[in-house]
Amino acid sequence: MEEKNYITPAGHERIRSELLQLLNLDRPEVVKVVHWAASNGDRSENGDYIYGKKRLREIDRRIRFLNQRLEFAVIVDNAARKKGEADAEQVFFGATVTYENLEGPERGKETTITIVGVDEVDLDQGHVSWVSPIAKALIKARIGDCVKIQTPTGPTEIEILDVQYN
């Protein structure tokens, strides 16, 4: 049995768009090239045919993967969480959290992260997986809470400054 794949609405849409792109545009184009290359005769030394078949396998593999991820996707929409409500100040999946390091070399540094699904991780944008150590430490904490997290340089304490749901 497959584990649930928690995902934000934006992440679900991104995966669905990629799947439709592969199914409706990329795959038919590669099939045309492979068909044309196959009609040219000797396939053993036909680069278009060999590369096309390889690319077709890659596309089919990605389509199967995306279908599986969408099949087990559980869309978590936090649009109902309003600023000022009690649960809007608590960290859950989909929250954008601003915190301050209270210890170590980065003491006083503010960092903002968004807790997203494993298929949406993008560290450059501050998107971290809900199964990451930082997200696990933050989930269910509230604004003003101090939590301990494990970092590569050792345990450190952080304070939650703000929680938002977009």
Image (spheres, rainbow, N blue to C red):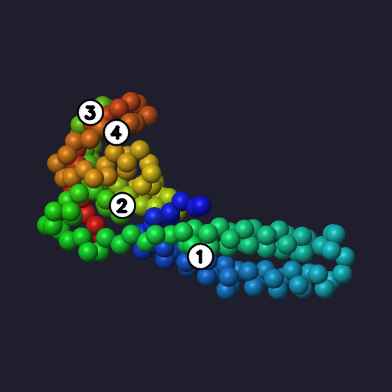
Characterize the local packing of mark 4: few (<14), some (14-19) or many (20 or more) Cα atoms within 10 angstroms.
some
Question: Label 2 belongs to which residue?
Answer: 93
Q: Earlier in the sequence, mark 4 or mark 1?
A: 1
Separation of marks 1 and 3 at Cα, in angstroms? 42 Å
| Vertical relation: 95 (above or below) 53 | above
Contact check, label 1 and label 2, Cβ < 8 Å: no
Give residue 12's position: percent from left, percent from top: 42, 63
- Residue 138 marker: none
Separation of marks 4 and 2 at Cα, in angstroms? 17 Å
Q: Amino acid at mark 4?
A: Ile
Q: Quadrant of the C terminus?
A: bottom left
Mark 4 or 2: the one toward you: 2
Q: Earlier in the sequence, mark 4 or mark 3?
A: 3
Helix, strand or loop status at disc 1: helix
Question: Label 1 belongs to which residue?
Answer: 18
Q: Earlier in the sequence, mark 4 or mark 2?
A: 2
Separation of marks 1 and 2 at Cα, in angstroms? 23 Å
- Residue 103 marker: 3
Residue 73 appears in the figure: yes
Question: Label 4 belongs to which residue?
Answer: 149
30 left or right, relative to 4: right
Helix, strand or loop status at disc 3: loop
Give residue 42's position: percent from left, percent from top: 88, 65
Characterize the local packing of mark 1: few (<14), some (14-19) or many (20 or more) Cα atoms within 10 angstroms.
some
Helix, strand or loop status at disc 2: loop
Separation of marks 4 and 3 at Cα, in angstroms? 11 Å
Separation of marks 4 and 1 at Cα, in angstroms? 35 Å
Mark 1 or 2: the one toward you: 2
Q: Amino acid at mark 2?
A: Phe
| Vertical relation: 86 (above or below) 145 | below
